[in-house]
Image: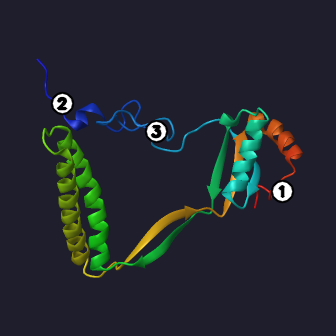
Amino acid sequence: MTTPSSPTSAWRPGMPGADTLPSGPAGRPSAPGQDGHGPETGPPTVTIGSYPDYPSAQRVVDYLADNRFPVEHSAIVGTNLTLVETVLGRMTTGRAALAGAGTGAWFGLFIGLLFGIFTAGNWLAVILVGLVVGAIWGAVFGAVAHAMTGGRRDFTSASSLRAGQYAVIVDAQFAEQARQLLGRMHMPASSPGR
């Protein structure tokens, strides 16, 4: 005969292993990096150069690859990240309806093509009807969605992440080889500490 266990019967302070947490529904806790919930712990790395823009860092890795360096042991790391939201223009109800019509037309074209494949009659008419109906519904939904914002966001924008510097790092065991190759490249790099 078994008795139902309570949460406190499985683990209590003072039991052997009391310095570790008990296992929970997801299993035993582990250190970050060992279970995919933290930074990966890998081999130690060394910064071999720091560059003001991504194309320069990319050129360095490309040069290393061209000279048979094992580039799978390298990485480009952007530091001093900044989120930049570029305002593209003013959003009006008409523009929202127009954008919705475009999206709806693409969806309507897709649905029209699906129905057109299985139509015995005029398949081109089915595709055109799907396109028109999709554009109309898209315009209606775009206008309504914009009107429901109440003017809180009357502009369109595009967001991007920009880094202040790009560091090229390699596994420590390949650092000397990478530095020798970069010495032949003759490309200026700022110091890794900057």
Horizontally, residue 1 falls left or right of residue 76, namely left
Q: Is residue 167 left or right of residue 38?
A: right
Q: Which residue is mark 1?
A: 188
CB contact under 8 Å: marks 1 and 3: no
Q: From what the image shows, is residue 34 above or below residue 136? A: above
Tag 3 secondary structure: loop
Residue 134 occupies quadrant:
bottom left
Of pointers 1 and 2, the one earlier in the residue sequence: 2
Residue holding disc 2: 5
* Residue where numbered disc 3 is placed: 36
Q: Residue at point 19% right, 54% down?
A: 130
Residue 181 at x, y percent in the picture = 84, 40
Q: From the viewer's perspective, is the residue at label 1 or at label 2 nearer?
A: 1
What separation in Å lies between label 1 and label 2 (alpha carbons)?
Answer: 67 Å
Q: Quadrant of the N terminus?
A: top left
Q: Earlier in the sequence, mark 1 or mark 3?
A: 3
The answer to which image quadrant residue 139 occupies is: bottom left
Q: Which residue occupies 20% across, 60% down?
A: 132
